[in-house]
Amino acid sequence: MTFPDLSTVNATEDLSELLIYVNLLTGGWAMPLVLLSFFMIILLGGLFTQIGKGTMRPEVLLAVSGFLTFGLAIIMSIKEGLLNPIYVFMSLGLALLGVAWMFLSSDE
């Protein structure tokens, strides 16, 4: 499969054209990895903050980071070719898993 040259990309339109080009070159893996990185940064950042404060509620962090990732996935899926819709539903499922864990956990 031949890829288009970078000079054929109209980068003056907006930045998403370059992101679509990078996603095309990586076989559709670049934007899901951006989502995963966003999720992990929020999850681990919140986890280390909670460890520093002495409170530990990973189920809340999973729900919050899942919903923030879902919001980013919605924004990324608006532009055609940037993100496959299956990743939007996967991030929603992750957020709902965190909410279910949060409701099923015991309050101490």
Image: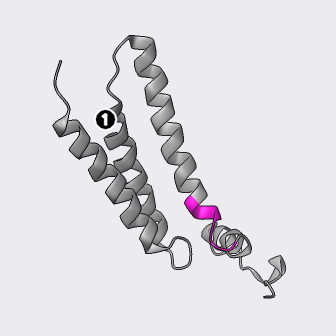
- Residue type marked 1: Glu
Dot 1: element: helix
| Quarter containing the N terminus | bottom right
- Count of numbered marks: 1
Residue 85, picture quadrant: bottom left
Q: Residue at x 35, y 31 (%)?
A: 58
Q: Is residue 2 magenta?
A: no
Picture layout, residue 94 above or below residue 44: below
In depth, the one of 67 and 55 nearer the eye is: 55
Colouring rule applied to residues: one colour
Q: Quadrant of the C terminus?
A: top left
Looking at the picture, how far across and down is residue 59, in whole percent? 31, 35
Residue at screen point 43% across, 71% down: 86
Q: Is 30 contained in the magenta span?
A: yes
The residue at 48%/46% (across/down) is 39
* Residue 33: percent from left, percent from top: 60, 56
Q: From the top left corner, tell me how far across and down residue 3 is, in percent.
A: 79, 83
Instruction: Pick whichever, 57 or 41, lies toward us.
Output: 57
- In the picture, measured across the screen, residue 105 lies left or right of residue 23, that is left
Dot 1: within a 10 Å radius of its alpha carbon, few (fewer than 14), some, or many (20 or more) residues? some
Q: Residue at x 56, y 72 (%)?
A: 82
Q: Nearer the viewer, residue 9 or 86?
A: 86
Q: Which span is picked out in magenta?
A: 27-32
Q: Give the quarter of the image for residue 25.
A: bottom right
Residue wearing tag 1: 59
Q: Position of residue 96 (x, y in %)?
A: 27, 52
